[in-house]
Image (cartoon, grey):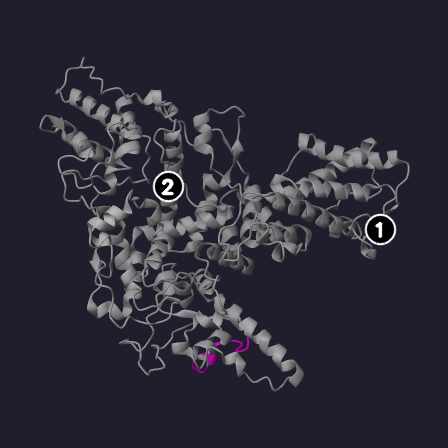
C-alpha cells in the first residue's frame, strides 16, 4: 500500500505529471515515443490504495513508467538517463541529478527493479534514499473524506447568500417558506425563478465583464466601427433631427444622445451573454452565434437601422437589443469583403469589434495576444503560465534563424498560439477589417487549430471555423464553469502546487484535485443540459465547496488546514455588490461606492484598472468606517419614525425601551438578534456571546450618556441639521441603536461574502 501511495503522491504528482506528461501524451510532441502517458481523469477519485482499486489512467501510467524503469541502455536505467537529457532525449534535461524530483525517480527505479527481481532485496544503494514520510507529507496517512470536520451553511443561509449575490436582494417570504417545506432541493427551483430576474442579468453582465473587460475601450465607443467601413453611419447622432427641441437645447441634447449611444455600443457583447441565458440558448453560441445584438441606436451606427427597425418594440429605446446580421463590409475603396453568403462572418464574442479592440495587435505581436486570450477565455488555458522560460534568449536567437518555429522552448507554445493567431489575420490593430496586402506571414505556423489546418475554402470564415471547433472541445465547458465559479466566489480555480519540496505539497495538491473533480462534474452537467449556463450556477451552488462555512474544530493539523484553505466563499464584496446589499437591507444605496470611491474601494474601470482589489487597504478600511457611520445615521432614526409593521430594522422595539430592567433587557436582546439576522444573516440565540457583546455595546452607550449628566434630548449629532434626523431621543436609545448598527456594518459578515 505504501508503495502505491508513493507512486501516486510522489512519482506521479511530483514528477511525471509535472514534467513527462507535458510531451508524452497522445497529442504531445513525444506522442510517438516509447513512453505514452494519459492525463488524469479528475472525475475519478485519486484516493487509490492498490493497483486493482486505482483509477485505470493511473495504473496505465504506472505500467508505462515501470517498463522504462527496468529497461536499460549501456547499463543504466533508460528512465533516469532520459530524465538527465541523455540518449537523445528530445526534451533535453528535465530533472537535474541533485533535484528532489530526480531522487524520487531514482527511488522508483530501484523499487521497481527489486519487485521485478532485477536487484536483491537487501540492496541498499545510496541512491535509494528518498522516503516520502521524511518530506513531511502527512498525506501518507489514509485520507479522511475531504469535507470531514467542515461545517456547512444551512439551506436558509445558502439562500440568503445566493439571492444577495445574484439578484441583489434578500430572500422573499415565499422562497423562505418553500425552503422550510422542501429543504435543500427547493434551491434548484428557487434559482430557476431568480435567474429570470433583471437583477440577475445585471449581475451576469458585471461578472462576465470582469472576465472579458469588453467595456474597457480607449477613445469614444463609436470608434469601434471603423472609419473605412462605417464612415457614413457611425456618427449618426451628429445629424440626428432634433428640430422638435428649442435651438438652445439642441447641442446639450446631442451630447446626451452621443453618451447614450456610446453606452449602448459598449454593452453589446454583454447583451449577447444576457440574450443567450435569458432565452435558454446553448452557451456555445457565445462563440458560434452568426449574429450580434444591436439596439435602435447601435443599429444606426452600423447603418442597418432602416432594414430592421420594424423588429424593435420601441425604435427609440437605446437599450432594447435584438439579434441582427451585418452585411459583408464594403470599404471606402468600393471593395467588398469576401463572403459567399453576402454576410459578415460573425463568430459570437470573439469576432465582435469590441473584443478585437480590447485585445489589439501590432506588427510584431501578429495577433498572438488575441490567440493567448482566446485560449485563456474560452479553453481555460493560460499559455504564458505554462510556457517554459529560456535562460538565454539571445543565444536562442543566435542559434536559430526562426526560433518560434525551430527552438524547442519556443515551439512548445507557438505551435498552438501561432495557428490561432493566423485565424485573426483579417483584422488590424484596432479590430477593424483590414487584411494584409502582402498576405499573412509565412514565418509562422499556418492558420489552424490544434493540429488542423484551415483550408483555403474556409479562409473567408476563419473565426466561425475556429468557433465551431472550440465549442466541441471538452475544455470549453470546463472554462465556462470556471467563469461561473469566479462570478459566484470572486476567485478562479485553484492552481496546482508547484514546489515539490513544500512539506504541504500533497495536501495542497489534494485540494486542487478535489476542486478539479467538482469543476469536471459541473462541466458534465453543463454539457448534458445542452450548455445551459443556469445549470452550472445551480450545480456550483449545490456543491460543498460553495456551502462550506468553517471548521468544526479549533485545533486542526497543518496539512488539513492546507487542504481546506480555499473552500467556501470568503471574499470582500465589490463596490457594486456592497451597494446592492445596502439597498436590499435598507431600501437605499449609499451611492458613494458607485462614484468617487469606486476605484479606491477596489473597483475596476476595465481599461487601466482590470483586477479587483480583494485585500483591504488602509483607504478601504476608512471607507468602510465612513459607510457604516453614514448608513446608520441615515436609516436608524428614520426607521423608528415608521409604523412597526413597516420597519426594516426595529419591528419589535421602541425607543423608550431601556436597559436595566428584566423585560427591557429581554426585548433589547431580541432586537439585537433581529439585527444580526437582518444585517449579517446569522440566526443566533439570545444567549450567544455575539448577542451579549452587542447588547453590552448598546447598554454601554446609554450608560455613558447618563453618566455624563447632560446630553441633547434630540437626535442630531453627526447626522447634520436636516429636520428628518432631528427626532426626540430622551433616553439616548436611538443614538445607541445607531452605534449598534454602525458596529454591525463594520463586521466581517457584512463586508464579506
User: Residue 186: image x %, image y %?
Assistant: 51, 47
* SS label for mark 2: helix
The residue lying furthest to the right in this view is: 709
Position above or below: 11 against 189: above
Left or right relative to 720: residue 468: left
Residue pointed to by mark 2:
516
Position above or below: 693 against 644: above
Query: Are discs 2 and 1 less than 8 Å apart at CB?
Result: no
- Depth check, front residue: 286 or 615: 615
Classify mark 2: residues with Cα within 10 Å, few (<14), some (14-19) or many (20+).
many
- Depth check, front residue: 396 or 7: 396
Circle number at residue 727: 1
Query: Residue 21, can we see it?
Result: yes
Q: Residue at x 79, y 48 (%)?
A: 718
Instruction: Locate the C terminus by quadrant.
Output: top right
Mark 2 or mark 1, which has the lower sequence index?
A: 2
The image quarter containing residue 43 is: top left
User: Residue 224: image x %, image y %?
Assistant: 44, 70
Magenta-drawn segment: 306-318
User: Residue 173: image x %, image y %?
Assistant: 62, 50
Amino acid at each position: 500500500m505504501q508503495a502505491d501511495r508513493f507512486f501516486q503522491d510522489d512519482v506521479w504528482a511530483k514528477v511525471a505529471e509535472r514534467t513527462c506528461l507535458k510531451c508524452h501524451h497522445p497529442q504531445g510532441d513525444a506522442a510517438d515515443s516509447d513512453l505514452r502517458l494519459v492525463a488524469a481523469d479528475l472525475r475519478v477519485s485519486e484516493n487509490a490504495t492498490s493497483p486493482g482499486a486505482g483509477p485505470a489512467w493511473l495504473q496505465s501510467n504506472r505500467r508505462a513508467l515501470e517498463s522504462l524503469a527496468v529497461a536499460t541502455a549501456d547499463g543504466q536505467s533508460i528512465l533516469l538517463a532520459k530524465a538527465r537529457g541523455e540518449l537523445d532525449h528530445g526534451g533535453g534535461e528535465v530533472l537535474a541529478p541533485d533535484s528532489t524530483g530526480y531522487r524520487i525517480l531514482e527511488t522508483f527505479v530501484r523499487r521497481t527493479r527489486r519487485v521485478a527481481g532485477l536487484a536483491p532485496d537487501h540492496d541498499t544503494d545510496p541512491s535509494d534514499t528518498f522516503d516520502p514520510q521524511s518530506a513531511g507529507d502527512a498525506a501518507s496517512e489514509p485520507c479522511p473524506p475531504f469535507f470531514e470536520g467542515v461545517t456547512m451553511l444551512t439551506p436558509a443561509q445558502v439562500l440568503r447568500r445566493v439571492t444577495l449575490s445574484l439578484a441583489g436582494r434578500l430572500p422573499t417570504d415565499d422562497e423562505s417558506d418553500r425552503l422550510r417545506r422542501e429543504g435543500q432541493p427547493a434551491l434548484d427551483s428557487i434559482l430557476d425563478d431568480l435567474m429570470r430576474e433583471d437583477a440577475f442579468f445585471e449581475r451576469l453582465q458585471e461578472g462576465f465583464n470582469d472576465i472579458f473587460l469588453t467595456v474597457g475601450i480607449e477613445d469614444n465607443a463609436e470608434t469601434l466601427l471603423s472609419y473605412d467601413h462605417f464612415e457614413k453611419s457611425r456618427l449618426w447622432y451628429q445629424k440626428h433631427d432634433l428640430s422638435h427641441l428649442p435651438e438652445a437645447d439642441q447641442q446639450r441634447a446631442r451630447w446626451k444622445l452621443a453618451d447614450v449611444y456610446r453606452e449602448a455600443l459598449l454593452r453589446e457583447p454583454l447583451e449577447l451573454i444576457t440574450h443567450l441565458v435569458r432565452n435558454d440558448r446553448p452557451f456555445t453560441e457565445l462563440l458560434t452565434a452568426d449574429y450580434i445584438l444591436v439596439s435602435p441606436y447601435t443599429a444606426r451606427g452600423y447603418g442597418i437601422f432602416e432594414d430592421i427597425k420594424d423588429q424593435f418594440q420601441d425604435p427609440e429605446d437605446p437599450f432594447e437589443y435584438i439579434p441582427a446580421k451585418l452585411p459583408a463590409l464594403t470599404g471606402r475603396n468600393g471593395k467588398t469583403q469576401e463572403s459567399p453568403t453576402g454576410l459578415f462572418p460573425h463568430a459570437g464574442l470573439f469576432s465582435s469589434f469590441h473584443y478585437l479592440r480590447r485585445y489589439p495587435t501590432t506588427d510584431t505581436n501578429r495577433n498572438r495576444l488575441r490567440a493567448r486570450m482566446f485560449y485563456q477565455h474560452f479553453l481555460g488555458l493560460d499559455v504564458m503560465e505554462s510556457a517554459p522560460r529560456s535562460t538565454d534568449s539571445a543565444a536562442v536567437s543566435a542559434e536559430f534563424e526562426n526560433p518560434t518555429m525551430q527552438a524547442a522552448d519556443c515551439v512548445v507554445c507557438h505551435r498552438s498560439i501561432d495557428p490561432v493567431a493566423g485565424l485573426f489575420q483579417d483584422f488590424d490593430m484596432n479590430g477593424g477589417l483590414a487584411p494584409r496586402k502582402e498576405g499573412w506571414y509565412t514565418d509562422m505556423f499556418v492558420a489552424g487549430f490544434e493540429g488542423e489546418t484551415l483550408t483555403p475554402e474556409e479562409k473567408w470564415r476563419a473565426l466561425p471555423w475556429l468557433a465551431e471547433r472550440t465549442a466541441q472541445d471538452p475544455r470549453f465547458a470546463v472554462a465556462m464553469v470556471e467563469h461561473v465559479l469566479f462570478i459566484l466566489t470572486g476567485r478562479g480555480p485553484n492552481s496546482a502546487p508547484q514546489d515539490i519540496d513544500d512539506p504541504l505539497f500533497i495536501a495542497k495538491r489534494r485540494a486542487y484535485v478535489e476542486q478539479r473533480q467538482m469543476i469536471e462534474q459541473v462541466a458534465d452537467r453543463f454539457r448534458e443540459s445542452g450548455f445551459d449556463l443556469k445549470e452550472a450556477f445551480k450545480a456550483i451552488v449545490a456543491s460543498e465547496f460553495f456551502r462550506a462555512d468553517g471548521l468544526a474544530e479549533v485545533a486542526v493539523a497543518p496539512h488539513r488546514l492546507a487542504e481546506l484553505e480555499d473552500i467556501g466563499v470568503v471574499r470582500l464584496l465589490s463596490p457594486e455588490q456592497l451597494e446592492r446589499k445596502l439597498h436590499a437591507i435598507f431600501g437605499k444605496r449609499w451611492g458613494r461606492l458607485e462614484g468617487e470611491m469606486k476605484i479606491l474601494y477596489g473597483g475596476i474601470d476595465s481599461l487601466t484598472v482590470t483586477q479587483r482589489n480583494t485585500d483591504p487597504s488602509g483607504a478601504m478600511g476608512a471607507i468602510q468606517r465612513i459607510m457604516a457611520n453614514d448608513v446608520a445615521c441615515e436609516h436608524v432614526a428614520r426607521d423608528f419614525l415608521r409604523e412597526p409593521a413597516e420597519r426594516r430594522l426595529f419591528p419589535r422595539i421602541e425607543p423608550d425601551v431601556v436597559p436595566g430592567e428584566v423585560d427591557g433587557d429581554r426585548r433589547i436582546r431580541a432586537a439585537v438578534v433581529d439585527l444580526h439576522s437582518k444585517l449579517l444573516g446569522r440566526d443566533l440565540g439570545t444567549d450567544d456571546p455575539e448577542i451579549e457583546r452587542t447588547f453590552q455595546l448598546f447598554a454601554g452607550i446609554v450608560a455613558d450618556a447618563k453618566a455624563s449628566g447632560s446630553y441633547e434630548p434630540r437626535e442630531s449629532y453627526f447626522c447634520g441639521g436636516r429636520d428628518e434626523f432631528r427626532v426626540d431621543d430622551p433616553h439616548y436609545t436611538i443614538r445607541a441603536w445607531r452605534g449598534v448598527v454602525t458596529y454591525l456594518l463594520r463586521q466581517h459578515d457584512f463586508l464579506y461574502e
